[in-house]
Every structure is written in structure tokens, then in C-alpha cells.
Image: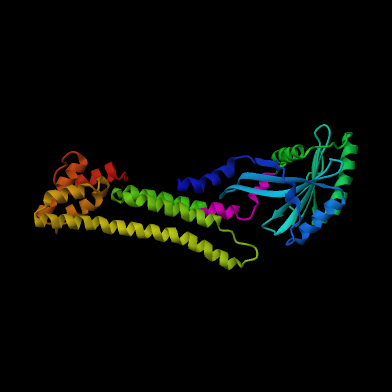
Amino acid sequence: MAGAWVFVPAVAFAIRPVRFRDKPLADPEATEPRALDPFYVRAVRAFAEMGFRPAGRIAASLWFPSPVRWRSGIEGPAWTASDGKIIASMYYLRDQRSWATAATTLFAGGGYLETVSRSPKAGWTLLAGDQRRMELEDVEPAELIAEHRRQIEDLARERGTPAREATFAEAVEGMMTFNNQNFPRGRLWKTDGVFWSYVFLGIFALELFVMLRTFAKFGWMSSFRPLALCAVAGGALLVTRVRVPRRIARLVGCAVLFVGVLTPMMLSSWIENRAIGDLFGAFDRLEADVVSGHTVEGIDRTAGLGPTACGAALQRYADPRTAPDTRQALHAILVRWNGGDLGDQPAAWASWCDHGVLGLK
């Protein structure tokens, strides 16, 4: 589950089309000015002076906006012009720590016009056809509305159809339809961090594959498998969610990424070394059981490690320093794992272990 949580967004981002979800929320109080935000206060006053009345909020969301995020959402207040032909809205851009202001108008016959003011510009404009989007560089609301009205006149003249009155819900529906049909998907791939997100996801995918191969050979480590997999998936999630803020030194961000990459690798190495030590310790206990006369108990306990421990068993079985009684106990364990006797020669058992159990070529 942890691995799926990490890798599903990466796959969905690569193959899924862009689908915005915009909802109108009837909450006029959301347009009330906030004393701690001077630009917002000026915007609210400007819209009121131009005859706009509070309409509510617009809640916009997008599934899989990046390789490491399942969903992103944003909400902003909206106002309706006195003639009902313009919907003005605002959104706070957290990355830029600034506001984006937009004016939207629907036309009879399916035309759509949107004028946006933001800094920096998003670089997404449509200046031809029945559906248009224009960007301005960080202008005041009065300038935005004035330019938007000029664009309304131009588009109405070109289309031969006027701008129409629209309810708040109709305008939000038009925004969602326009974005889903025209949003350039390639812009998401140019977002900061997309390339490095896939780099780190690739690193952890490779690490996960190597760990699975390793643990396939050590069945006795089944109790550690969930811990190892969660560590790798959690490390990948940590690394890919780390973003280097523009106002923080790149060195600090790189250090965080380095720790995120190194920690799962060190944990994997520690688990594997501990596993190997526990395995050989199990055969040391078998030898002690044989010496103390508890051979049957020792065979039952060691056989519980499973056939994937055959490599360590054969190493002890072929060692000339192994006592005859211990070798006999090891032979009994091998017979139990295989379900038949392959004889006393270690070579025959080695072929069965390498090819039949571990799948080595």
C-alpha cells in the first residue's frame, strides 16, 4: 500500500489527461476584506466601487498535478458585475506569494473570454478563435476590468454575438470546461521539480527491486519485509515531496534530499546485514543442539527457516570442519526442504539450491 501511494501519482501524471474540477460555493462573506492583506483590501474596495457584488467562492481542484501529488486544490472569492456579464475572481498563489486576479465572460453561442493578471505570467494565452485567454503583468483590478471590457467589445464584434448574462454557477462551469479543453498539458511537465521527482522515484524503484530480490533469497527474513518495504516507500515519498523553496538556499534543499536518499539505503543495508548474522547464528544454535543432545528440536527449528536458507545450510554442510553429527542433521534438513534425498555430495544439493530454489542461472 505504501509503495502504491508513492508510485500511483507518477504513473497517473504521465498518462492521465488534465481534468479540473471547479465548484461554485455560495459564501458571499468570503469576499470580506482581511486587514492583514493590503492588496486584497484594495481589490475588494475596487470591485465594490466598480459596481461588483459578492458572489461567493470558487473551489478549483486537480488530480495528479505532479508526479508526487495526488490532488491539489485552491479556493478564491468571486464577484459579479452589476450587468451580470463579468465574473471577477481572485486566487492566492502560494509559490509566488502573490494574488492572481481574473475576469471571465461568456458569450452567446459558446464564446468565452478570460483576462488574468498575475506576476509572473503563466505564459498561457489564447488570442484567436471563439475561446480566448489573455494575461497581464500584475495590474490593479480597475485596469484588469477596463482591459477585459475592451476585449469583450473586440470579441463581440468579431463573432457577431454579444456577451451574455451568466449566473455564478454558469460562469464557473464555463471556466472548468475552458480549462479542461484548452489547458496546455505540456506546461505541467515544465513545472519545477518534475524531472527530479522522476529521478528520485526511479532511484527508489530500483532500490525496491533490489531489496525484493535480496529478500527472495532469505525467506527467514519474512518478519522484516514489511518494515523494509515501508521504509523504502516512505523514503521515496519523503524525498519526492521535498521542494526547494525559492527563498531558501539551494544548499539546504540539497542536504535534505541527500538525507532522504541515504536513509533508506542505510536501513536496507542494516536489515540485510542483520539478516545474514541471524541466519548463520541459527546454524550455530543447531550445532549446539546436536552437541547437547537436542538434535530433533534443533532440526525442527532450523527447518522452519525455509528452503531459501539452503545456501547457508550447504555452506555449513560442505565445510570439512563441520562435525559428522551436525552434517547428518543438516542432511536431514535438506531432505525435508527438498522432499527427497539427493545423496551425500554437496554438489548435487548445490544444483538444487541454486536453480530450483533461488532461481540462479
Q: Is residue 124 visible?
A: no
Indicate whether 307 appears above or below 290: above
Q: In terms of image quadrants, where is residue 192?
A: bottom right
Image: magenta residue range:
184-200
| For residue 176, side relative to residue 251 (left or right) | right
Give me the residue at 85% from left, 49% from top. Answer: 145
Q: Is 2 part of what is drawn in magenta?
A: no
Quadrant showing the C terminus: top left
Q: Is residue 89 in view?
A: yes
Residue closest to the eye, 344 or 224: 224
So how many labels did they put on this image? 0
- Give residue 8's position: percent from left, percent from top: 52, 44
In this rendering, would 212 be left or right of 40? left
Q: Residue at x 23, y 57 (%)?
A: 280
Q: Main secondary structure of the magenta part?
A: helix
Q: Position of residue 209 (x, y in %)?
A: 42, 49
Q: Residue furthest front?
A: 29
Compare residues 254 and 347 and report the one nearer the observer: 254
Does residue 34 lie above or below 7 as drawn?
below
Image quarter hosting the N terminus: top left
Q: Position of residue 196 (x, y in %)?
A: 57, 55
Does 233 sit left or right of 215 as displayed? right
Q: Nearer the viewer, residue 202 or 19?
A: 19
